[in-house]
Amino acid sequence: MTAQDVTSDPAFDELVRMVADARRVLVFTGAGVSTESGIPDFRGPDGLWKKVDPAIFTIQNYLADRSVRVRSWRNRLDGAIRHADANDSHRAIVDLQRLGTAPVVVTQNVDGLHQAAGSGDVIEVHGTIRDVVCMNCGDRNPADATFARIDAGEDDPPCLRCGGILKVATISFGQALDPDVLDRAFAEAEQADCCLACGSSLSVMPAAMIPLRTVETGGSLAIVNAEPTDLDGIAGTVVRGRTGTVLPALVDALRGRR
Ligand code: NAD
């Protein structure tokens, strides 16, 4: 789908109208905004769940089984996320923020690419791979030093403070979300009169309840996604397309209305 196809879609016109008329927009993102950086999503056509068993990535398996940790560190090290750069979706979201009505991004992503693109206030409801945390003493540090230890030959580096098990600071299956982070995301959803959900199947709970909260508190929902999502039925508009095409077109259209 080209930018021209997007702009001739009536659903896109409605998207522009909804964002332009909103007093406060909450941008909510999922793995789809990072696929154009080469990071696979979970449930898209080339998603990770087509290739690996999600059961392996539970916190219980991580803590109990050294071989799971070795595999997990190797995945992080060799995986797409560590070397990925921000793409046009992330940059368009920065532009949207600079237009003034979308101060905060709530993301399910753990890749840090919104910040890499220049977004300031990013609420990461599923954590980040840019930090590591000790599962025993809670010591938290930037991940690069741990990745360097793996590069140097350690396959399951222990905490340097207490010898405990280290893990990237993401929320694994079976692990509770940080209640303070979640509270802030829901508060932002309530303050927004429009939630712009981008690149998410809107099927992972409780994260998908964040855009839902905007609707429940009287706001509207606009969706940009390549495939149908679980919340299409309650959205004011659904633009079916790549975020790297649709979001820059949205920014251009909003600038054109000023
Ligand atoms: P998901 O995999 O459930 O859904 C992604 C959606 O994005 C799919 O519907 C897919 O069709 C769509 N999509 C893919 N590429 C797109 C594009 N270029 N433009 C528009 N849409 C596109 O992802 P989710 O809803 O974020 O939930 C899955 C969980 O996966 C999240 O909790 C997140 O933490 C985790 N995750 C994160 C990353 C990352 O940090 N980049 C990568 C994979 C998974």
Image: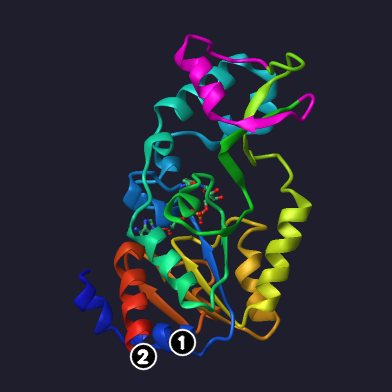
The answer to which of 29 and 99 lies nearer the viewer is: 99
- Estimate how packed mark 1 is, as few (under 14), some (14 to 19) or many (20 or more) residues with alpha carbons within 10 Å: some
Which numbered circle lies on residue 257?
A: 2
Q: Quadrant of residue 121?
A: bottom right
Q: Position of residue 177 (x, y in %)?
A: 72, 48
Q: Quadrant of the C terminus?
A: bottom left
Q: Which residues are magenta?
A: 136-158
CB atoms of marks 1 and 2 within 8 Å:
yes
Horizontal placement of 197 versus 181: left or right? left
Horizontal placement of 186 versus 40: left or right? right
The residue located at (38%, 61%) in the rendering is 91
Answer whether residue 139 is magenta in the image: yes
Q: Earlier in the sequence, mark 1 or mark 2?
A: 1
Residue that carries the numbered disc 1 in the rendered image? 20
Q: Is residue 126 above or below residue 154?
A: below
Horizontal placement of 188 versus 45: left or right? right
Q: How many marks?
A: 2
Looking at numbered disc 1 in the image, what kind of residue is underneath it?
A: Ala
Q: Is residue 45 above or below residue 83?
A: below
Horizontal placement of 208 versus 16: left or right? right
Answer whether residue 129 is magenta in the image: no
Q: Quadrant of residue 82?
A: top left
The residue located at (66%, 15%) in the rendering is 158
The answer to which of 41 and 19 lies nearer the viewer is: 19
Q: Quadrant of the N terminus?
A: bottom left
